[in-house]
Image: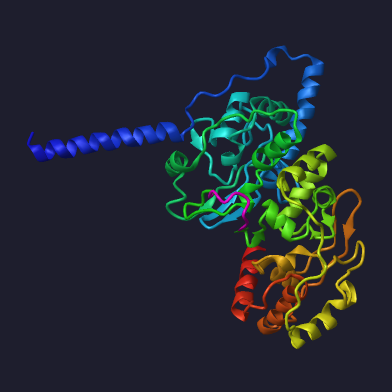
Amino acid sequence: MNRFLRIVTLFALFGLVVLGTVYWIGRGSGDIPAASVDFASLDGDQRQEMLERGEWVAHASDCAACHTDPSGGSDLAGGLPMETPMGTIYGTNITPSDDHGIGGWSADDLYRAVAWGVAPGDKNLYPAMPYPSYHQITRADSDALWVWLMAQRPVNKPNRSNDLIFPFNIRPAVTLWNAFFRPDAEPFQPDETPAAQGEYLVNVLGHCGECHTPRNLAYALTDDHLAGEVIEGAYAPDLRPDALARRGWTEDDLVTFLHRGLSPQGVMTFGMFPVLSHSTSHLATDDLEAISSYLTAGQTMTGPQMDKPVAVLSPEGASLYTGLCAGCHGTDGAGQPNSSVRLDVNTTAMYTNPLNLIRVIAEGIPERDLAQGERMQAMPAFDQMLSDQQMTELVNYLRQRWGGQEGDVTAEVVQSAREEGHAAR
């Protein structure tokens, strides 16, 4: 064999070794923690305790937000579309159906899928399943979740195939993504302090960073944890303590918002409304207080600030506000309880990104029950009534008067936001 062929052969063998190593790492073949209990010997009280804990884990992890049947069936039967830059991913059936769900999964299988992103048969899950956050789930919580899931009603609904563009439709390629971007599965070490409970709920089970953290070109989470990101056509805002303080949040307001879906700072809309319905409204007050304390840690929270800097306001924007908005929200932006939200302390106008404000004005908000008896009446949609230029004047007026922002939104920005809204609906 000449030298050239030897070099080529050497590189080929090296490449095979690298690919094999990447595959082995990416498929989640590492050791997993031992089961937290002997499932075969559980007595009735132990099983009931695990069922209750598993239901709590399901709510805290917001499983139903992605696995709900959009046709109105089970919260766990799958089919919900999730839009990504690479195409549409559909939530899977996680009921204990033997044919279409996870009825044949063991507790080890569930842990590996949740913490590693690898289903039985070494099938890589797409990272729309938030295993980069769930990688710290405790084995006890994963086991409790398994017991609870296996006790649910099986739904024999087939899973829907994903609709992804090339090369993302090649599932084994996720192996390479995992090798570069997936954290190692390291169970969280909880203690009894609220700080640890808040960290575990926000960063692990609640996986808040999956929506609120910027992503890189590979759609992996960056180091700017909770700094805000546009996802599925809406802006998931910056949740860092200083940003929350600037927008007038208090710890009590955050608890109220997560518990009821409504606070002086606004009402849950877009992707947060399902989070309220399936997750935060079901959590105990001490859980919500731990979340709030963790998110605001080290920051003085002064509460809503009604005296915003007032620039030279647009007469056209003021006229549009008086004619279209003041009847419900008041000339002073004070709103009406359980009818229209306050605008004088509403955080939507305070975001540097105007996307949500434009979409709410254009699309309105449906009448809906929130949680704990709270209810909001419908806000009408003005998409067909306002031109891009009129929307620009109104948005800039709201951002300048109550948002502390410059009046720098352009008609092009409005048009783009409207298009994002149409694509997301």
Color style of the picture: rainbow
Name the residue located 52 percent from the left edge and 37 percent from the top edge: 183
Name the residue located 77 percent from the left edge and 40 percent from the top edge: 290
Name the residue located 76 percent from the left edge and 52 percent from the top edge: 300
Quadrant in which residue 186 is drawn: top right
Q: Is residue 175 magenta?
A: no
Q: Give the range drawn in magenta.
A: 222-229
Q: In which quarter of the image is the C terminus?
A: bottom right
Quadrant in which residue 249 is drawn: bottom right
Is 224 positioned to the left or the right of 53 in the image? left
Q: Where is residue 57 in the image (x, y as percent from the top left)?
A: 73, 34
Q: Position of residue 418 (x, y in %)?
A: 65, 72
- Front residue (pair 109, 318): 318
Question: How many marks do you count on the picture?
Answer: 0
Looking at this rendering, what residue extends furthest in the left direction? Answer: 2
Q: Is residue 279 visible in the rendered structure shown here?
A: no
Is 181 positioned to the left or the right of 401 in the image? left
Looking at this rendering, what residue extends furthest in the bottom direction? Answer: 315
Q: Is residue 100 visible in the rendered structure shown here?
A: yes
- Front residue (pair 411, 311): 311
Residue 81, compared with residue 41, is above or below; it is: below
Q: Does the magenta stretch include residue 224?
A: yes
Q: In which quarter of the image is the N terminus?
A: top left
Q: Where is residue 11 in the image (x, y as percent from the top left)?
A: 22, 38
Name the residue located 68 percent from the left edge and 17 percent from the top edge: 37
Q: Position of residue 226 (x, y in %)?
A: 63, 51
Magenta span: predominant SS is loop
